[in-house]
Image: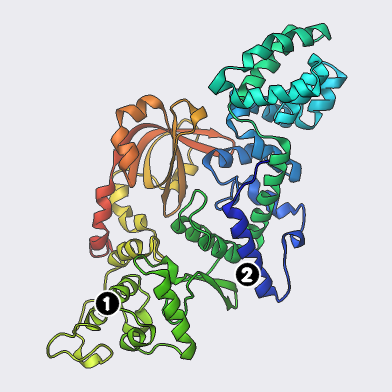
Amino acid sequence: MDVLGLGMLAALRRALALVARRRGREFRLTDIPAEDPAVYAMISRADTVGVFQIESRAQMAMLPRLRPRCYYDLVIEVAIVRPGPIQGQMVHPYLRRRAGLEPVDYPGPAVRGVLERTLGVPIFQEQVMQLAIVAAGFTPGEADQLRRAMAAWRRHGSLESFEQRLITGMRARGYAAAFAQQVFRQIQGFGEYGFPESHAASFALLVYASAWLKCHEPAAFCCALLNSQPMGFYAPAQLVRDARGHGVIVHGVDVNASGVEATLEPVEEGPALRLGLNQVRDLAREAAGRLVAARVDGPYRDVGELARRAGLGRRELAALAAAGALAGLAGHRHRAAWEAHGITAPLPLVPVAGDPAGIPLLRTPGEGEDIVADYQALGLTLGRHPLALLRPRLVASGWLTAAEVAGLAAGARLRTGGLVLTRQQPGSARGVTFVTLEDETGQVNLVVWRQVAERQRRALREARLLGVSGRLQREGEVLHVIAERLEDRSAMLGALQVATREFH
């Protein structure tokens, strides 16, 4: 029995509770409408940041090709982007057959009964076991031994003992030698981890539920994901940016409005997302709880009152000031930091915090300074994307935006770059590294072949702002930049603090 603890289950529970509270009635998983075309259209666009199981780079590349249209398509999607089907060379035949580019044929009616639902290509463990029974004469017990061997053959090399039994059994029942050899190669592929159909079907339910929430309740979905961190492929910065791109209004952390966790607030356009105090770095959850509990007696009027009622010290106040959470009490970050500093150790001849007469004329932070402070204190910003401020320099360096890259023809040579969101090197990729970059217009996906990765290992592994020169590969809606040269431009991020004065 395989018992899994999935972070998405907690996120779904939180999201459903938020939807129920907003709608004023109970809303459960079973209340989510089935087979919604809008959900499948969103999935087919690979608009799946945050969605269970299909938010990875490999899944996003597969979605526009497979184009799921129903629940069972999601079952296949979950199972097909796995080392087993990939190593067994089952992915491309399935896609070609699904697109009508290759005929679907079966060597016999028994095999058709096993493989018809997956267009003649074995994708699930159960199908491999059934093939062994109907095509090679295995007993159910022997088929189960085969399943166990598939899971363990890389460690113990026990799968080869079944090869002759399978091939002999298939040949005795009239199947061609080429078909028998192909089936065994596919079984070897499943030794690299193939999914049981029952497992994939269970996961597909969560795929659909999370996709429906993202499609129709994006504020609640993002809120639930933030409150369930850490989980998934994306940091809060990407989750919030994606939600805003889908029209969600997001408000910053505020000591008079934020809960301990992210919450939803009613606005005319629909629910708005309010970032929680738990987003503030260096602020203990217990201190955030005291702040929220003390606010029951009314909003805080100044920093001094906040410190007294919530029992906050200088360090906690400094964390709130750095995060911009004291803006409603003290104005901009510099003034808030000054007031927070003066709470426990007032300077000579300067009145206590809360008395404006004693506050010096501190310069308002520039846009770049605020963005840097946001990332340092919150891990995200509600201001402009950092690369929007650096764009004049990036244009001078010949960098295209992600939107401009998307408009190029296949084979075009280009130079671009962005903040590194993910680096992935799947075991089935044979040394290839997949990198996702982000700028103010979107994302660019890189394929870095082993030789390039080895030559430019440091830039690939360490860069926060990565530049790339390469060639565009286009397959339908799926775009990749084949990297030829990488450059670490992280030092440019240090220019953000002066970017406003230089360029705007």
Looking at the rendering, in which quadrant would you find the C terminus? Answer: bottom left
Find residue 18 and name its label. 2
Find residue 277 and name its label. none
Q: In the rendered view, how is the structure colored?
A: rainbow
Q: Which residue is mark 1?
A: 314
In the image, 231: left or right of 500?
right
Quarter-wise, where is residue 335 in the image? bottom left
Residue at (62%, 64%) from the top-left corner? 15
Residue 104 visible somewhere in the drawing: no
Going by the picture, which residue comes out furthest to the left?
348
Pick the front one: 115 or 488: 115
- Badge 2: how crowded within 10 Å, few (<14), some, or many (20+)? many
Q: Earlier in the sequence, mark 1 or mark 2?
A: 2
Q: Label 1 to label 2, Cα distance in Å?
A: 34 Å
Residue 99 in percent (x, y) is at 71, 31
Pick the front one: 442 or 234: 234
